[in-house]
Image (spheres, rainbow, N blue to C red):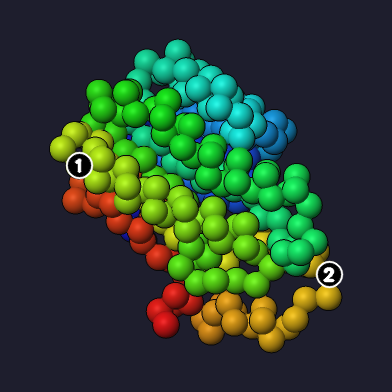
Amino acid sequence: MLGPSDMKGRVALITGAATGLGRATALSLARAGANVCLVDINASDLESTANDARGFDVRALVHVADISMQGACREAVAAALTTFGRLDALCNVAGVFLPNHAHEMPQADFARTLAVNLAGPFYLIQAAIPHLLETRGAVVNVTSCAAHKAQAYSAAYCATKAGLSHMTKALAIEYSKQSIRFNAVAPGGMMTALAQNVRNIRDPDVDLMKRISPVRGMVEIDEVAAMVAFLASDAAHGYHGACINVDNGITAD
């Protein structure tokens, strides 16, 4: 399995680190030797991730925050710097998925989707860039196969993931002459808590849902986490402006 290079002495900030892909990414980086700043709104599960990360003989900082708020993003980056003195990687993994019929989607759900999936990563990147330039670091954004393949009942989610993918490329161009890397990973469906929200759709059209059903099944969380961690490390020094699909072929057509 692909994985990061030796990251002993390096520092990575991972959002969504309490559960699912964020947790798996944090543990993959800790396994490679990175000290980790774990950010999530879920305090109890965040502590569990931190305890497991420390089992790899690294330091783990728990920072509870709602990344939809610009101030909270700045504070998260500041906390990592205060504790560890440097920042080498920012992994924007946190996301929300609030599917609904477009004409029934509450304004609050639409705003929340944009705030967490698109604005939050930008605010974190904005705060982290000066420090990542110092360490020749990397940003890895987790988008989705929904950035490339439209899905029913997911207009807001698709828009944010497509936006985050293109934001990654725009940043890669803007900083192409400087010592920082921007890449993205676009997973297919994984067995995470996020995926469970599909069940909340009222009277879904099964035929429409089948359009995004992969022939090879769901993607393994650890495989996606390994790719995120790889791109965050020096092993991926040749990757800049890339969006890697890890989706069992769902976007191949």
For mark 2, what is the residue? 202
**Residue neighbourhood size for the residue with mark 1, other residues' Cα within 10 Å, grouped as few (<14), some (14–19), many (≥20):** some
Which image quarter holds the C terminus?
bottom left
Identified by mark 1, the residue type is Ser
**Residue neighbourhood size for the residue with mark 2, other residues' Cα within 10 Å, grouped as few (<14), some (14–19), many (≥20):** few
Residue 108 in picture, x, y percent from top left: 75, 45
Q: CA distance from mark 1 to mark 2?
A: 45 Å
Q: Which of 230 and 125 lies nearest the eye of the viewer? A: 125
For mark 1, what is the residue? 176
Q: Which of 135 and 177 lies nearest the eye of the viewer? A: 177
The answer to whether residue 179 is above or below residue 20 is above
Q: Which quadrant would residue 138 be assigned to in this image?
A: top left
Name of the residue lying farthest toward the right: 202
Q: Going by the image, does 238 lie left or right of 151?
A: left
> Does residue 116 appear anywhere in the picture?
yes
Residue 74 in picture, x, y percent from top left: 50, 22
> Does residue 225 appear anywhere in the picture?
no
Q: Which quadrant would residue 227 be assigned to in this image?
A: bottom left
Decide which of tag 1 and tag 2 comes sooner along the chain: 1
Q: Of the numbered discs in the image, which one, if any, rests on residue 167? A: none
Q: Which of 104 and 136 lies nearest the eye of the viewer? A: 104
Identified by mark 2, the residue type is Arg
Element assignment for label 1: loop
The answer to whether residue 32 is above or below residue 54 is below
Rendered residue at 65%/72% (across/down):
152
Name of the residue lying farthest toward the front: 103
Name of the residue lying farthest toward the left: 177
